[in-house]
């Protein structure tokens, strides 16, 4: 259960995304330039001290029938605008470890753009589950985000810091 508690700490820090009223608006996180290294530096790791390579930030959903809304930072500074199969699987694993969601029940994960994945899980033993995720995601494009150190809007809003 410790990895999920660590995971919850990582995504519930005060620097996580907070969606506004619009289903497509969000504030980019104010993490350091390399959030993955930031977690390691502060001793926030997965099993056996392994680095956390996907960081899910979540909040209350916009849709009434969804259970959570998320944004996922992936390795290499990329992000997933879909609910993310990896993030939804991790969410189910943490909910199962915390005994906060029953095996076989459908969890609806909403993205910052309003798309949805549905997930269920089957428990294998006390520490492992097999998640089942359904939904559709599309490749929107490939891009490189460049941030100038002098840019006061580099994290998406004025006065943001590394």
Image (cartoon, grey):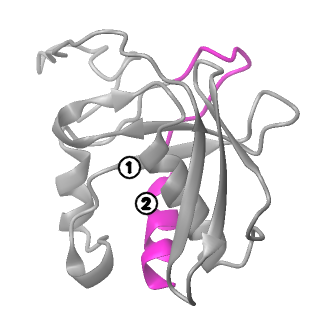
Against 121, is 81 above or below? Answer: above
Query: Residue 93's x, y, as percent?
Result: 55, 67
**Against 2, is 34 above or below?**
above
Residue that badge 1 annotates = 55
Residue furthest out toward the right: 64
Q: Are marks 1 and 2 in contact (CB under 8 Å)?
A: yes
Can residue 27 be found in the magenta stretch?
A: no
Dot placed on the residue nearer the N-terminal end, 1 or 2: 2
Q: Is disc 1 placed on a helix, strand or loop? A: strand
Quadrant hosting residue 94:
bottom right
Q: Which residue in the structure is indicated by mark 2?
A: 10
Residue sticking out furthest to the bottom: 126
Q: Quadrant of the C terminus?
A: top left
**Count of numbered circles in the view:** 2
Mark 2, residues whose alpha carbon is within 10 Å: few (<14), some, or many (≥20)?
A: some
Report the span colored magenta: 1-26
Quick one: label 1, few (<14), some, or many (20+) residues within 10 Å? Answer: many
* Residue plotted at (26% across, 74% down): 43
Q: Is residue 51 left or right of residue 59?
A: left
Q: Is residue 16 magenta?
A: yes
Q: Which mark is residue 133?
A: none
Q: Is residue 56 visible?
A: no
- In what element is the residue under mark 2? helix
> Where 94 falls versus 30 (above or below)?
below
Q: For the point 75% across and 67% down, which residue is it?
A: 101
């Amino acid at each position: 259960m410790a990895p999920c508690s660590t995971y919850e700490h990582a995504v519930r820090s005060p620097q996580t995304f907070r969606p506004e009223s619009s289903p497509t608006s969000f504030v980019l996180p104010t993490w350091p330039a390399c959030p993955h290294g930031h977690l390691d530096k502060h001793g926030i790791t997965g099993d056996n001290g392994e680095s956390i390579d996907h960081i899910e930030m979540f909040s209350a959903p916009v849709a009434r029938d969804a259970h959570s809304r998320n944004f996922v930072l992936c390795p290499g500074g990329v992000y997933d605008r879909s609910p993310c199969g990896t993030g939804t699987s991790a969410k189910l694993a943490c909910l199962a470890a915390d005994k906060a969601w029953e095996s076989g029940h459908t969890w609806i994960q909403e993205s910052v753009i309003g798309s949805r994945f549905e997930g269920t899980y089957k428990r294998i033993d006390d520490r492992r589950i097999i998640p089942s995720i359904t939904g559709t995601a599309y490749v929107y494009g490939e891009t490189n985000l460049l941030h100038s150190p002098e840019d006061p809007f580099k994290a998406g809003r004025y006065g943001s810091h590394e």
